[in-house]
Image (cartoon, rainbow, N blue to C red):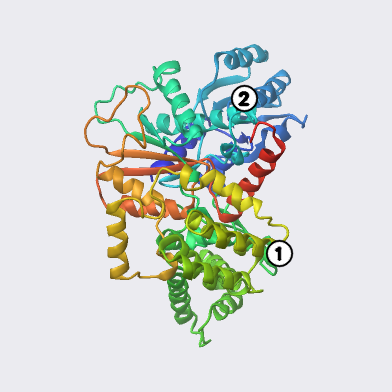
Amino acid sequence: MVLVSAVRDYINRMLQDISGMKVLILDSQTVSIVSVAYSQSELLQKEVFLVELVDSISKSKESMSHLKAIFFLRPTSENIHHLRRQLASPRFGEYHLFFSNMLKDTQIHILADSDEHEVVQQVQEFYADFVASDPFHFSLNVPSNHLYMLPAVVDPSNLQNFCDRVVDGIAAIFLALKRRPFIRYQRTSDIAKRIAQETTKLMYQQESGLFDFRRTDISPLLLIIDRRDDPVTPLLNQWTYQAMVHELIGIQDNKVDLRSIGKIPKDQQEVVLSSEQDAFFKANMYENFGDIGLNIKRLVDEFQQIAKSNQKIQTIEDMAKFVDNYPEYKKMHGNVSKHVTLVTEMSKIVEEHKLMLVSQTEQDLACNGGQVAAFEAVTNLLNNESISDIDCLRLVMLYALRYEKESPVQLMQLFNKLASRSPKYKPGLVQFLLKQAGVDKRTGDLYGNRDLLNIARNMARGLKGVENVYTQHQPLLFQTMESITKGRLRDVDYPYIGNHFQQGRLQEVVIFIVGGTTYEESRSVALQNASNSGIRFILGGSVVLNSKRFLKDLEEAQRIARSSPAVV
């Protein structure tokens, strides 16, 4: 509950001490921060009758002096400008200003000078500057996420903005946890090193007083790594519930937009998937797709008995029909009907795009050796008209990442086949991926074939057999957590910053992935935390990726790199 609780705690403190009718004013970032932690009905209970965005409220002139305004904003110069305009001609009776991170002295002076009408009751910093989508998983929703792939010389000012946002988010996490970490980073990544250095400078020099919590227990570890060290995980199809919904439909701030699907009842066009608010989702978010269907069927069966219905339910379509026929079922299990809708839709997508066929080859490319068989499997799928262009692109990328050194001739054949099949995907994008995240750029043992221990582990896994061919892949993060737990994370690969080193046995680790996390990785973290290893892991990233978003970032970075003289 740690991250969600921290954000809820801040919001409670903002709302509960101010009595009477309130308006909550947010910006485009804090609206995400609040919406994943607090429901609309909870806001109403706290007498919040209106939620507005700061840029739209600046355009309105209507007086609302009977309302008390609570602003919760990121401390950006744009937001300070909005507040100056507001305070010049106040529309509300009282102004309570809360910022999600540290204010600069100059910003405080601007606010003080602007408050000529003396309507500002308080100015506070509440460090909820991250989107806590799950108890141990947060994102920063950084808009220009592709920037992490570009050298600093290409777009220095935007890259600085990217780094500033990441450092702010990491700082807020540790201020919310009331800890100051020691910091390590991935040696092969310039951007990870830069963020580690800037975070250290902030926590140990510029704001050392703020981060000095006078605690005697062992400091946590902050490990900053680069998405490009594991480019495989965001390219794979997913078969566990939360990850699969994000891959096939898309989750944004714990909401799923179903409007494009067709005949969907009004109340189901946008559904919330939150482990805090939905018991079924909490119990099933990490389960395999096959098990989800059975678990939903069990709930429908229970209701059938109550409704004394004899309707035969064998398939997912039957379930969807049953839920439609019984409006009272929706009332009783509003949340189950949304899961029936999601599972029905995903089953259609899996069937239509032949994803079981595609996924089997993807998993083989990610987990098993055998270049000849892999080449044949990918070639067959590229020849299959039923396979979508984007799936073909991902298959060639997965093959290239694994066999770039072993089979350059076959790789060229796949490039040509991909280009002739779909002119949109010129092979340049696969080459760009190899330049970004090829074997020479990576630190970790991505395929478990560099390190003797990993080779032995993979052999043992092969002998034992795999429970499910579609979920045999484990993200590189799993190995990283294992190395940390066993005290085997090598200093040479993940150096410390400054002279702050680990003292004693670790109890808490925050791993931040520059470039974004995946729900497969957050599942790994949740399972690791449930194993009671004595260490609590928290995972964060600049965004939450699915394969579409990863490819979009890659394309955007390639477009900028091509047009920039600074990139050779």
Q: Pick the quarter of the image with the C terminus.
A: top right
**In this view of the protein, which residue sits in the foreground, 27 or 143?**
143
Mark 1 nearby-residue class (10 Å; few <14, some 14–19, many ≥20): few
Q: Quadrant of residue 397?
A: bottom right
- For the point 42% across and 44% down, the residue is 539
Q: Position of residue 111 (x, y in %)?
A: 62, 16
Earlier sequence position, callout 1 versus callout 2: 2
Q: Residue furthest left?
A: 504
Say left or right for 217 vs 423.
Answer: left
Q: Position of residue 532 (x, y in %)?
A: 26, 50
Helix, strand or loop status at disc 2? strand
Q: Which mark is residue 94?
A: 2
Say left or right for 337 vs 193.
Answer: right
Q: Position of residue 212 (x, y in %)?
A: 35, 21
Q: Is 234 placed above or below 315 here?
A: above
Helix, strand or loop status at disc 1? helix
Say left or right for 566 vs 503.
Answer: right
Amino acid identity at mark 2: Glu
Q: Is 545 placed above or below 472 here?
A: above
Q: Nearer the viewer, mark 1 or mark 2?
A: 1
Distance between the alpha carbons at the discs numbered 1 and 2: 64 Å
Amino acid identity at mark 1: Ser
Q: Position of residue 527 (x, y in %)?
A: 34, 55
Q: Is 323 placed above or below 206 here?
A: below
Q: Is residue 394 visible?
A: yes
Q: Is residue 73 visible?
A: no
What residue sits right under mark 1 in the picture? 420
- For the point 50% across and 50% down, the residue is 231
